[in-house]
Image (cartoon, grey):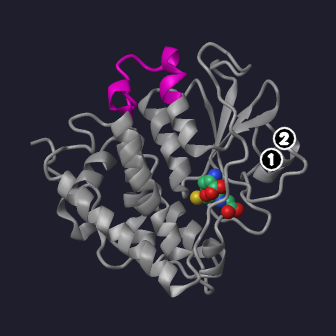
Amino acid sequence: MTTREVEEGHFVRQPNRFTERITADGTGGLPAEPGRYRLFVSYACPWAQRSMIVRRLLGLEDVIGLAVVDPIRDERGWRIPGRDPVTGVEFLSELYLRTDPSFVGRFTVPCVWDTVTERLVTNDFPAITTMMETEFTAHHRPGAPDLYPEALRPEIDELDRRVYTTVNNGVYKAGFATAQDAYEEAFDALFTTLDDLEERLAHRRYLLGDEITEADVRLYTTLARFDAVYYSHFKCNLRRLVDYPNLWAYARDLYAIPAFGETTDFDHIKRHYYVTHPHINPSGIVPKGPFLDWTAPHNRER
Ligand SMILES: N[C@@H](CCC(=O)N[C@@H](CS)C(=O)NCC(=O)O)C(=O)O
């Protein structure tokens, strides 16, 4: 974190504490075995939704377990309704502290628990999806898409650097800025990128061409929350998603795929953001709208 960021009201995301790697061949001690790992997620969280989408697209539902937290978080952090049947915990913090009793920081989703060594092995969200894509291939369903094809990795990674900085994390930088300049800087960068992506999607069905990749998963989770949350709650209000014909049709095209649509829970999303950030929404009132038709024809096949 630079002095400028601290002094000038920029939002700074904490580094990921647990960054171990699960591997196909078990080097490093964490083999990609079915039934061994448990993924903790919130439907509200864009970083966690990425991992749910990828798990589902690759057919890893019976390979990697899933625990879903309650969308409303109080000062005790994420809670697992009725306790997690596998680990027995009620709060996610218990897993963080069992793994590292000296952990200080936010207890975040997504994270992966190893049921064999009984510790959190990763809360590194970009690594969680690429790990499922590259280390769990032996367990992918027949016909699963290659979401991170080797030939496209440089382009996916390069696009991600911009999309992460200005869009995925950009909305948070706008929403959690505590200085006007920091907010406006994030706002301008966000809409410059969205304008460019709108243009890019005029010529291709998905970000990298005709096939869905990790890049689409990453962009989608921010678009899904855009009009319901980021436009108002995070003050990202130059344009709505629905004002971008290509981006909006692209988002609906993805939403029509069960891995995307069925992991998109607008109720959890809205209640989480509007209730859990009292510093920017002190009343905790959850807006009724917007009323969007995510199932309207998108005509992106053409
Ligand atoms: N691990 C990353 C990203 C994951 C993340 O931000 N997750 C949010 C939900 S979207 C979370 O779990 N927040 C818990 C908290 O702030 O107490 C981070 O630490 O910033």
Residue at the far right in the pictured view: 101
Quadrant where the C terminus sits is: top left
Crowding around mark 2 (Cα neighbors within 10 Å: few <14, some 14 to 19, many 20+) is some
Q: Residue at x 36, y 47 (%)?
A: 159
Residue at the far left in the pictured view: 302
Q: Which is more toward the observer, 157 or 214? A: 157
Q: Quadrant of residue 210?
A: top left
Residue 132 picture location, percent across and down: 53, 29
Lateral position of residue 274 relative to residue 220, left or right: right
- The answer to whether mark 1 and mark 2 are in CB contact below 8 A is yes
Is residue 235 visible from the viewing direction of this image?
A: no
Q: Residue at x 59, y 71 (%)?
A: 11
Image mark count = 2
Measured along the vertical axis of the image, is residue 188 above or below residue 94?
below
CA gap between label 1 and label 2 equals 5 Å
Q: Secondary structure at mark 1?
A: helix
**Residue 145: within the magenta?**
yes
Measured along the vertical axis of the image, is residue 264 above or below residue 241?
above
Give amino acid for label 1: Tyr
Name the residue tied to disc 2.
Answer: 99
Lateral position of residue 140 relative to residue 4, left or right: left
**Residue 89: within the magenta?**
no
Residue 136 picture location, percent across and down: 54, 21
Q: Which mark is residue 221?
A: none
> Which residues make up the magenta segment?
132-153
Residue 220 picture location, percent across and down: 38, 52
Give amino acid for label 2: Thr
Name the residue tied to disc 1.
Answer: 96
Q: Quadrant of residue 237?
A: bottom left
Is residue 28 visible from the viewing direction of this image?
A: yes
Measured along the vertical axis of the image, is residue 201 above or below residue 37?
below
